[in-house]
Image (cartoon, coloured by chain):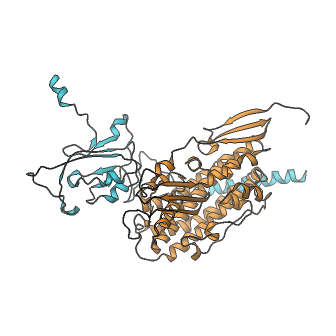
Chain colours: A cyan, B orange
Amino acid sequence: MKKYFLDIYRGMRSILKGMILTLIVAFRPKATIQYPFVKRELPTRTRGRLYCNIDDCIGCKLCAVACPVDCIYITANKRGPEEEIPLTSPESGAKQRKFHLPQFDIDFTLCCWCSLCTVVCPTDCLYMTKEYEFSVANQQDLIWQFGEGQKPGPKQKIEPPHLKSVK
Amino acid sequence: MSELKTQELTINMGPQHPSTHGVLRIELLTDGEVCMRAIPHIGYLHRCFEKHAENVDYMGVMPFVDRMDYVASMNNDIAYAMAVEKLLGVEVPKRAEFIRVVMAELNRIASHLLAIGTYGLDVGTFTPFMWAFRDREFILDIFEMASGARLLYNYLWIGGVWMDVTPGIEEKIKEFGDYFGPRIDELDTILSYNQIFINRTKNVGIIPLETAINYGLTGPNLRGSGKKWDLRKNEPYSIYPELEFDVPIGTGEMGAVGDCWDRYMVRVREMRESLKLVKQALKQMPAGPFRAKMQRVRPAPGEAYFKTENPRGELGFYIVSDGSIKPYRVKGKSPCFTSISCLDEICQGAMIADVVAIIGSLDIVLGEVDR
């Protein structure tokens, strides 16, 4: 009987203590932010969406090899013997770009943001941006193109040339 | 009344039950309100970690290791990285070791905060959950500064760490050290020594020491049963022998030794010890390189096993190499898998509502159970 009332007393005391503490905490600065309206400032190393500056890419495919989920697709065609070999920008080491790169696609549905591809890149042309909001209505829009002559962004549908002639 | 034979009823708990901490299905054999058996069915989060590991190179396994115990990625990384380093025979620079320990101990705090917060949620209190997540956010911000990611870091690499810590992070960790000490006291007031919480968890789900050892429990679950066993002390690795800390064990001050409250309290006390470790390691951190100079990881044929103390217990990696750039076999010994194996034994005779409290106190992460 005594234990019963003691328990009630202790329970009430615990609740009172907790309530006082909650009241104190309620007057502290808020820990939350109103996300879509207010955005956090991200640190410099934030690993967001990958971006490839194709003008600096030498087509070595080290990133595609390092990727644990194989989400980078590169097509590299060797330049002809008469063709002039352009160089990458001086900041990235002025390396020879021996390949045409008609395809440099990254599938963001597979990407696991491990940053292993950006580390191995010899010219630092593949890097991670601070962009982190990439919900799309269509899954296809998550496959991005960075190839030469292409606008970086969701992969555009290419109509095969033989179909064009039929029309 | 006892001679009345009632019909046993089988109930499915999960896999979407919120208190099973993920996707665990438990087949409960009940007699009225009393649970006769609790058979865990696992495999809903099976992602073929071990098979995946055979198909990517040694460094590429790291992101998959992160995803095993996704609330303590840094601790997983340290285990895998040290296993590969043992295979390679690489010596890690001193600074990298210190960064690793700071990160691992911070992640231990974050993991225990999640365990404590959700345990409060399981037994019916909401405020500590929010407070725990608020403090955990502070740690995640530190990790984001260091690695750029908030949950799956891929920061501790084979041979050291990915990059040196960002300038300014030491001040931030120091700030956290000063900030977090009083917050544990607040957590104690609102949850640990709350009489309602104590009455709810004392003498529930008692794991006697003998049972704990028989089932191979490790980590806070074993220490809650009163055994002082911590790999950081008993089989020291990295720089732990140079640092001072205690190993808290379950004392049975509220009920029997090894009950839910003891296991919970071991985690709370471990957070204080981790905070001590972080402060010490930060103070002693030397300058120097942060990663060992090494070529592409290609160990000689052989095998290695390395185990570390995870927030949930003893995590080990057994790696077999055949001399190629890909591991021949990687086996992860997960502490949660052993924890869940004793669920049947300790749930026998408990109320159905207590099963929830028991699962919460075992602190399982299904990502690691199924791998």
Decide if residue A165 is on the left or right side of residue B26: left
Residue at x 62%, y 69% (from the top left corner): B235
Give the image location of residue B176, x and y in percent: 53, 65
Specify whether residue A30 is in view: no
Q: Quadrant of the N terminus of chain B?
A: top right
Residue at x 70%, y 44% (from the top left corner): B356
| Residue A149, quarter of the rendered image | top left
Give the image location of residue B29, x and y in percent: 75, 37
Specify whether residue B84 is in view: yes
Q: Nearer the viewer, residue A62 or B100?
A: A62
User: Which residue of the protein is positioned furthest toward the left in this rendering?
Assistant: A82
In this view, B337 is above or below B286 = above
Decide if residue B67 is on the left or right side of residue A94: right
Q: Nearer the viewer, residue B258 or B297?
A: B297
Give the image location of residue A3, x and y in percent: 87, 53
| Residue B188, quarter of the rendered image | bottom right
Give the image location of residue B144, x and y in percent: 44, 58
Decide if residue B208 is on the left or right side of residue A58: right
Residue at x 38%, y 70% (from the top left corner): B293
